[in-house]
Image (cartoon, rainbow, N blue to C red):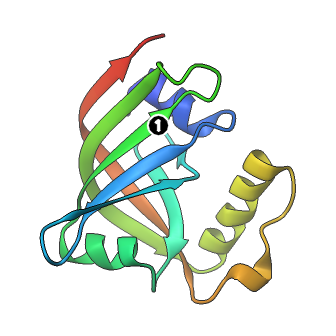
Amino acid sequence: MIDQQLRTLASEGRNFGVLTTQMPDGSFQSQVLWVDADDEHLLVNTEVDRQKHRNVQRNPRVTLTVIDAANPYHYAEARGRVVGEERGPRARAHIDELAQRYTGGPYDAAAIKTERVILRIEPERLHVNGA
């Protein structure tokens, strides 16, 4: 079970996340993205050919910070690891669900270059700022 404040920030509203992964040379890459959560994991939807997916295949440790769109001083930083992924029709449907929540419309199918994948992140450490 993930922290309720974190789950709420990640699964309600248009709160963006910043995912940090480690590059092959040891440097870090951070990207702003759409986020989601279920009862157990933070969820990030990407494509299998993207750098962040390649990074977590090599090193599953990540940091995901979710920022409250209404108050950017309220955020949750979760340090953890990618413990699983889901591909196929569910990953494709999930990106449409996220697009609906964040943009009010469907995801641009033409933007998909490879297979969609949901990364399941298990938080191990959590810092929540503000309320």
Where in the figure is residue 1, as x and y percent of width and height? Answer: 37, 33
Point out the residue furthest to the left here: 26
Where in the figure is residue 6, as x and y percent of width and height? Answer: 44, 29
Residue depicted at x 52% and y 24%: 72
Where in the figure is residue 107, as x and y percent of width and height? Answer: 77, 67
* Local secondary structure at mark 1: strand
- With 94 as the anchor, is 4 left or right in this view? left
Residue depicted at x 60% and y 70%: 91
Q: Which residue is mark 1?
A: 66
- With 115 as the anchor, is 42 left or right in this view? left
Where in the figure is residue 13, as x and y percent of width and height? Answer: 69, 34
Is residue 123 placed above or below 76 in the rendered structure? below
Residue depicted at x 39% and y 53%: 19
Tally of numbered tags = 1
Amino acid beneath label 1: Val
- Residue 14 in sight here: yes
Point out the residue furthest to the right here: 105
Neighbour tally class for label 1: few under 14, some 14-19, many 20 plus, Cα within 10 Å: many
Please name whichever residue, 80 or 74, is drawn nearer the observer in this view of the structure. 74
Residue depicted at x 54% and y 49%: 35
Q: Please tell me in which quadrant of the rendered image residue 26 appears.
A: bottom left
- Residue 37 in sight here: no
- With 98 as the anchor, is 125 left or right in this view? left
- With 111 as the anchor, is 15 left or right in this view? left
